[in-house]
Amino acid sequence: VTAGLSLAVATLQQREEKTHNLFGGNKVEKAVKATEEKFGTYWPRNILILFGPPGAGKGTHGPKIEDLLGIPQLSTGDMLRAAVSQGTEVGKKAEAIMKAGGLVSDEIVIGIIRDRIQEPDCKFGFILDGFPRTLAQAKALDRMLASEGARVTKVIELEVPDSVLEERITGRWIHKDSGRSYHVKYAPPKSMKLGADGKPLPETMKDDQTGELLMQRKDDTADALIKRLKGYHGETVPILDHYRPDGIVRAVNANQKMDQVWSEILAALQRKA
């Protein structure tokens, strides 16, 4: 749907360039706007869930999917912080619970997602990253979407053997603001320099686009990975079984070269996949 919209808009923009001097740009601009409104009103939203264990490549391929489809990638952590910062009704509830040392309930998280997807950039769809994490959350998400006449349209699982993930995780560096992901072996930043011990010098680990320093997550360790994988397999994988009967789950072999992974993702995103 989004790809069709992009093609329609691109075609209209090309026509605008050719006819602007003869007829003026207002008619074309109105036509583009009308096309956007039609797709946003009458076509179903493209709602994608991206799954994968820690280190599977969600941080690498998620932004590429976002750029391809023209829909935002939504992180529950980012949405929660934004809701608290903006002082929304749901955000105030979440803030009170967190200040008291409690865990934010599924109901509040769903409420935050409901508010976020009403924003204009989600008109044609969105990508969920980090949610749902449990079967109960998946069912709650389904109910919320159904109340708005929407549903999850595609679930993509990035598959990587547990034995491969340790090297990926311990070598990962993150740009905090954007979520861009780097790896000292597979996708190093251009600025990386190695010390005498063969390890990267932290002060040289900078984001390619902004030049800002990268960081390593506290839980990107071998010991933490064991616990995280146990949680992923025990709680998240059953969600795939929940959506599988709908025919929308697609598995991608993420244990190969990045361009090959991306080719499989593109195939999985296609409507005929």
Image (cartoon, helix red, strand yellow):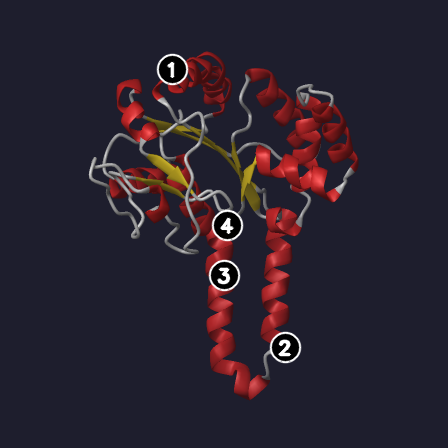
Q: Which of marks 3 and 1 is in front?
A: 1
The residues tagged by marks 1 and 4 sit, at their Cα atoms, a distance apart of 38 Å
Q: Is mark 2 on a helix, strand or loop?
A: helix
In the rendered structure, find residue 2 and report the number of the disc placed on it.
Answer: 4
Q: What element carries label 1?
A: helix
The answer to whether the residues at label 4 and label 2 have Cβ atoms under 8 Å apart is no
Please identify the residue farthest to the right as the structure is shown: 89
Q: Nearer the viewer, mark 4 or mark 3?
A: 4
On the image, the x and y values in percent for residue 213 come to: 42, 47
Frontmost residue, 94 versus 127: 94
Q: Which residue is drawn at 55% across and 16% down?
A: 135
Residue wearing tag 1: 226
Q: Which residue is drawn at 30% across and 52% down?
A: 191
The answer to whether the residues at label 3 and label 1 have Cβ atoms under 8 Å apart is no
Amino acid type at circle 2 is Asn
Frontmost residue, 140 versus 44: 140
Graded by Cα atoms within 10 Å as few (under 14), some (14 to 19) or many (20 or more), the crowding at tag 1 reads: some
